[in-house]
Image: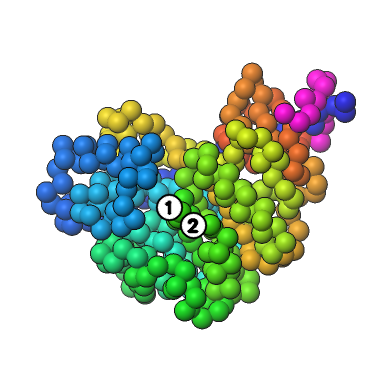
Amino acid sequence: MPPEVRWSASARRPVELPETVERALAAFLKSRFPKATKERLKYAVRDLSEAFTAERARLPGSYLNQPPVRSAYLAFAHPQQMLRGLAALDESVTRAGSRGLWPERVERVLDLGAGLGAMTQAYLVHRASEPWPSFTMVDHQRSALKDARALTTSVALALHPDRSPPHVRTAPDRLLPWLASEREGSYDVVLLGAVLNERREAWEPLLAALVRLVRPGGIVIVVEPAHPATGRRLMELRESALGMTTTVAPCTHAVACPLLALRKDWCFSTRGARLPESVAALARVLGHQAVEVRYALWTFAPRPDAAPFEAEPGTLGRIVSDEMDRERVICVDGERQRSRGLGVAQRGDLARSRGGVSDRPSSGRR
């Protein structure tokens, strides 16, 4: 077997919310749900957390319209979803920018299945130095959208109290009917945060409906929970669309995913995160981790061959496993390779070849 290429990776900086935004979230929760004491929230968050994991099917489709559930979501899940969105945007904007695929000017952003607007608010945090675009939030939960608009205004003012908040349009509707009614080529960036995993229908019709709304030069960012079934379905959706899209992230190649050949593997990212202290405290009470976020990601341009990848073949890979016997598995151009010396890296980090080879034979495909 050929000798193994040496790889190196740098740890990514943990994502965090500005303190002003943390205070804005806490103030909104207190004003919107004044009876949501710490004790009440503890039990409500525990029930919601269980429903999101082992018992997801028992949550009704309009769960955010229920005040106890919404208060628990705001207190615990919403800040974490913002951090996932922030991590996904960080990776997507960097990768797209290196290939000339990030829109030169973002004027209109669409947040599909917006819920309480976590993806929109993550966008505000990540792009706070730029002029605000206008946002369109679509969700069938009418009262949740009302809170999403108010919360988005609060976050924008927390970031820039001297600047007018962005224009926010809300559309209380089901996704497919709304997509069919909207004008083609209307949006520069389309955001979907934890939307597809809640759909019992096939995902392909939604993909086909949304891509026609993206302006030439636009980008779609899909962020889903790091669950095995959800992650694999997202990988399958990407593979089904190879002929009509150009992947920006997470992949470093434009070919079929090698992890789909393994029934127990799926692609997701782990990113260090500093959770707000109130969220971290609830996480510790529940026995959850409080130092990272995990998510599955697919960012793409809705047109084929939009740009070449940012590195020569064989020189850029993605870490797709946890450490096993001091080794990591790296996805390189649709192939799986093993490498040592990546202990500081996390799953989802990019690895670059160092131009040399080790004296240990390659493990080849796992």
Q: Is residue 348 left or right of residue 192?
A: right
- The image shows residue 111, relative to residue 193, as above or below, that is below
Counting from the top left corner in percent of width and height, residue 176 is at 47, 69
Q: Badge 1 is on which residue? A: 198
For the point 13% across and 52% down, which residue is it?
Answer: 34
| Residue occupying the far bottom of the picture | 183
Is 253 left or right of 139, judged from the image as shown? right
Viewer can see residue 66: yes
Quarter of the picture holding the N terminus? top right
The percent coordinates of residue 191 (x first, y second) are 49, 61
Name the secondary structure under disc 2. Answer: loop
Relative placement, left or right, of 19 versus 84 is left
- Range shown magenta: 355-366
Mark 2 = which residue? 201
Crowding at mark 2 (Cα within 10 Å: few <14, some 14-19, many 20+): few
Residue nearest the viewer, comparing 97 with 297: 297
